[in-house]
Amino acid sequence: MTLAEIKKILECEVWAGEDGLSIEVETVVASDGMSEILAFARPGALMITGLTNIQSVRTADIANVRAMIYIRGKRPADNVIELAKDLNMPVLGTELGMFDVCGILREHGLKGGM
């Protein structure tokens, strides 16, 4: 599934990486715990989190995930978005909660990262 398709079904806003919406993802890792992201993310996964500090982008980069979605209507600070842009990391945001986001993505054929 492409990020553009995900953007549409989750009604996301795009804050970084608008040109990367053609990226395909097959797996998802979802957590507000960055140690869990590091432990369980598969390279190329989509990261779902409600943690909007700069460490979330650094964690995504280290874990080699393809893109991030911030949930529950949270918007990261400008410096977080700038780092994501510097790393060419697409960053989206949705009003939906983690449970709903994971359920919707699962219904559309995406798998967990483990």
Image (cartoon, rainbow, N blue to C red):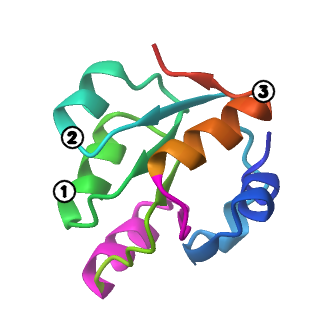
- Dot in front, 2 or 1: 2
> Residue 114 at x, y = what percent?
45, 13
> Residue 71 at x, y = what percent?
45, 61
Crowding near the residue tagged with mark 2, few <14, some 14–19, many ≥20 C-alpha atoms within 10 Å:
some
Q: Quadrant of the N terminus?
A: top right
Crowding near the residue tagged with mark 1, few <14, some 14–19, many ≥20 C-alpha atoms within 10 Å:
few
Whichever of labels 2 and 3 marks the residue nearer the N terminus, that label is: 2
In what element is the residue under mark 3? Answer: loop
Which residue is pictured at 46% across the width and 43% down the height? 47
59 is higher (above) or lower (below) than 83? above
Which residue is pictured at 21% across the width and 40% down the height? 34
Amino acid on which the number 1 mark rests in the picture: Gln
Q: Mark number for residue 34?
A: 2
Pick the front one: 102 or 82 = 102
18 is higher (above) or lower (below) than 70? below
> Residue 32 at x, y = what percent?
27, 46
In what element is the residue under mark 1? Answer: helix
- In the image, which residues are magenta? 78-97
Pick the front one: 47 or 65 = 47
Which residue is pictured at 41% across the width and 60% down the height? 87
CB within 8 Å, label 2 to label 1: yes
Q: Mark number for residue 55?
A: 1
Please identify the quarter of the rendering in which residue 75 is found.
bottom left
In what element is the residue under mark 2? Answer: helix
The residue most toward the bottom is 78
Residue picked out by circle 3: 109
Whichever of labels 1 and 3 marks the residue nearer the N terminus, that label is: 1
Amino acid on which the number 2 mark rests in the picture: Met
